[in-house]
Image (spheres, helix red, strand yellow):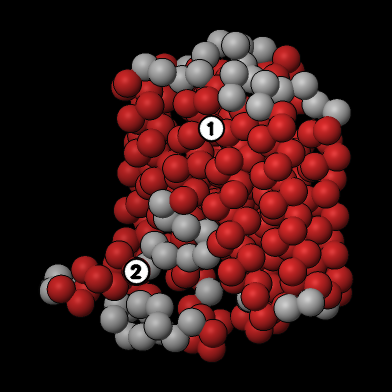
């Protein structure tokens, strides 16, 4: 295989998805920092892992979804003919192997934390792989992605800092609910491809309007939970969730704005997560 500029651009493009290559690892790393991981070696190792694992999740998903992408995402590298499916699979496999190597480093530092990273990789594989394909189940799809971005990094950070997970678990529900709501909005844009692949997302099963109501109920549930939660930046957390509620509410009237709402609410999620996790685990 000859590597030219178009091939390199193709491999780089293989990592792209609505599940951003950079946003997701940054959220995961931010979670670990806010929980209290501070050793430079650990921060660097986790940052590299989150980047590699997200690249694997995205690239493997693009390999498995090549037929539906040919209908809805013709500009992606494989449908566009920039790289072949075999080349893409080799690249994705390489990312998985590198992710395992980095995860093993954490395993030698703290066994349970390393095991959680390996579990994360396994879920990333099951997310798209035929037969199992976690993404074909409603709610399970979003739960897997939220686990990759927040829940598993949170648990890993608590384990590395030798804290009691149960003592800090009260901040998990609102962040998880918020994440599920955002990923439900994301599914609105993938109805055609999901139908082709046989995936059963909320928008596909119940229609866009009911999916918006479902997403809105998740974000509102997170908001109501935070109202009764004791965190240092409670007001900021409430304001950020109110902003997300307002954005998702727009889709009740303008469904075509789903992509703007998805990216807008994703951006605000940084503020929500930071305000809820700030000094949560001291």
The 10 Å Cα crowd at callout 1, few under 14, some 14 to 19, many 20 or more, is many
CA separation, marks 1 and 2?
A: 26 Å
Q: Residue at x 80, y 26 (%)?
A: 229
User: Residue at horizontal 34%, vertical 72%?
Assistant: 86
In percent of width and height, residue 149 lies at 56, 44
Please name whichever residue, 177 or 123, is drawn nearer the observer in this view of the structure: 177
Percent x, y for residue 168?
70, 19
Give the quadrant of residue 176: top right
Which one is nearer the viewer's eye here, 277 or 47?
A: 277
Vertical relation: 169 (above or below) 95: above
Quadrant containing the N terminus is bottom left
As drawn, is 81 to the left or to the right of 54?
A: left
What percent of the width, then of the height, locates residue 153? 54, 33
Quick check: 181 left or right of 227?
A: left
The disc label shown at residue 31, or none: 1
Dividing the image into 4 quarters, which one contains the C terminus? Answer: top right
Which image quarter: residue 139? Answer: bottom right
User: Tag 1, which secondary structure?
Assistant: helix
Q: Is residue 79 visible?
A: yes
As rendered, which of 64 and 231 lies closer to the eye? 231
Q: Nearer the viewer, mark 1 or mark 2?
A: 1
Residue drawn at point x = 58 percent, y = 41 percent: 271
Secondary structure of the residue carrying numbered label 2: helix
Disc nearer the start of the sequence (1/2): 2
Task: Check if mark 1's residue and mark 2's residue have beta carbons within 8 Å.
Answer: no
The residue at which mark 2 appears reads as 13
In the figure, residue 266 lies in which quadrant?
A: bottom right
Is residue 120 shown above or below 153? below
Residue at 39 percent of width and 46 percent of height: 51
């Amino acid at each position: 295989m000859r590597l030219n500029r178009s091939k390199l651009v193709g491999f780089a493009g293989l990592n792209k998805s609505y599940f951003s290559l950079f946003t997701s690892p940054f959220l995961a790393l931010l979670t670990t920092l806010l929980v209290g991981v501070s050793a430079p070696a650990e921060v660097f190792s986790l940052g590299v892992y989150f980047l590699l694992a997200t690249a694997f999740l995205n690239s493997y998903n693009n390999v498995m979804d090549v037929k539906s992408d040919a209908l809805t995402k013709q500009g992606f590298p494989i449908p566009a003919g920039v790289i072949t499916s075999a080349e893409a699979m080799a690249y994705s496999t390489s990312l998985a192997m590198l992710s395992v190597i980095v995860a093993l480093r954490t395993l030698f530092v703290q066994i349970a934390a390393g095991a959680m990273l390996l579990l994360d990789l396994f879920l990333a594989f099951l997310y798209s792989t035929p037969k199992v394909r976690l993404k074909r189940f409603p709610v399970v799809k979003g739960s897997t992605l939220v686990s990759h971005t927040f829940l598993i990094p949170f648990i890993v950070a608590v384990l590395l800092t030798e804290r009691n997970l149960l003592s800090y678990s009260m901040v998990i529900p609102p962040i998880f609910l918020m994440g599920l709501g955002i990923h439900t909005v994301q599914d609105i844009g993938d109805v055609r491809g999901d139908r082709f692949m046989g995936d059963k997302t909320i928008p596909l099963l119940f229609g866009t309007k009911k999916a918006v109501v479902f997403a809105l109920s998740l974000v509102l549930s997170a908001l109501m939970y935070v109202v009764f939660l004791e965190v240092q930046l409670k007001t900021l957390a409430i304001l950020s969730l109110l902003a997300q509620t307002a954005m998702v509410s727009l889709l009740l009237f303008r469904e075509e704005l789903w992509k703007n709402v998805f990216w807008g609410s994703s951006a605000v999620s940084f503020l929500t997560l930071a305000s809820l996790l700030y000094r949560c685990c001291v």
